[in-house]
Amino acid sequence: MTTLGVNIDHIATLRQARGGHDPDPLQAAVLAELAGADGITAHLREDRRHIQDRDIYLLKQIVTTRLNMEMAPTSEMINIAVDVLPFMVTLVPEQRQEITTEGGLAVREKERDLAKAVETFRDHKILVSLFINPDINDVKASKRVGATHVELHTGYYANAAGATSIAEELGKLKDAALVATKLGLNLNAGHGLNYHNVPAVARIDGMQELNIGHAIVARASLVGMEAAVRDMTALM
Ligand code: PXP
């Protein structure tokens, strides 16, 4: 069975838009868990554009499933992660100007640094996932640096238009997944998954967990609209 990690970054994005307390990603995490999420994912970005340090520390206290901390492999973030001790870290590349994470980690170019980071996490008993493009060579490099998990970047699949390119991108995910499972890597995937494109990815052999954020938060904002308006009119 494929499990679900709910990414709550976008709840924090909405909070940061007003600079206040609402909506609180911690409350979103609790509700997601109550609804059956198998894990909570949050990305502490270098520029702190959504999730804040306070969120990560408090999430560690309240998440009763598994906390997956997404982060760039910088020394600042590594220090925070070994202090917070999440269940798992997912290492992602980070560019300040990007709207969201744009590509997978350049694992082969950074093998030595990544191996060092992985060792630090292993010393602290934190599992390590590498967010990579669905590329067989990146899967093999992830194994070489000692990662326990890979998260295949599904953004190319999600953005593909037309049956042929969708099938092509799905094929790349399946090929990368096969190599990952053969190498004994735990297999996750995420980015751009929604209510239409998720079934095919969830059915890939060996797929363990999908990390999904935007589509869930977007739907939550709409399916909750009626109740929110009703609650307001009742007070007026
Ligand atoms: N996985 C990783 C590594 C990500 O960076 C993101 C986006 O924050 C996600 C999954 C979730 O992507 P989406 O918000 O498009 O569902």
Image (cartoon, rainbow, N blue to C red):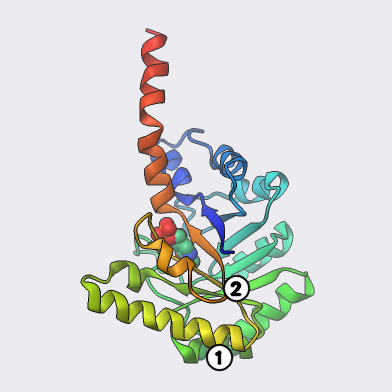
Q: Which is more toward the observer, 191 or 202?
A: 202
Q: Which residue is mark 2?
A: 129
Residue closer to the observer: 174 or 151: 174
**Given the image, on which type of amino acid does mark 2 rest?**
Ser
> Farthest residue in the top direction?
236
User: Which numbered tag is attached to residue 148?
Assistant: none
* Quarter of the view holding residue 29: top right
Q: In the structure shown, which secondary structural element does the residue marked by tag 2 occupy?
A: strand
The relative height of residue 113 versus residue 199 in the rendered view (above or below) is below
Image location of residue 111, percent across then percent down: 57, 89
234 and 14: which is toward the camera: 234
The residue at which mark 1 appears reads as: 140
Count neighbours of disc 1 (C-alpha within 10 A) and say few if under 14, some if 14 to 19, many if 20 or more: some
Figure check: 173 above or below 208 = below
Please name the residue shown 62% across and 51% down the image. Answer: 56
177 over 229 or under it: above or below: below
Q: Residue at image x 34%, y 72%?
A: 157
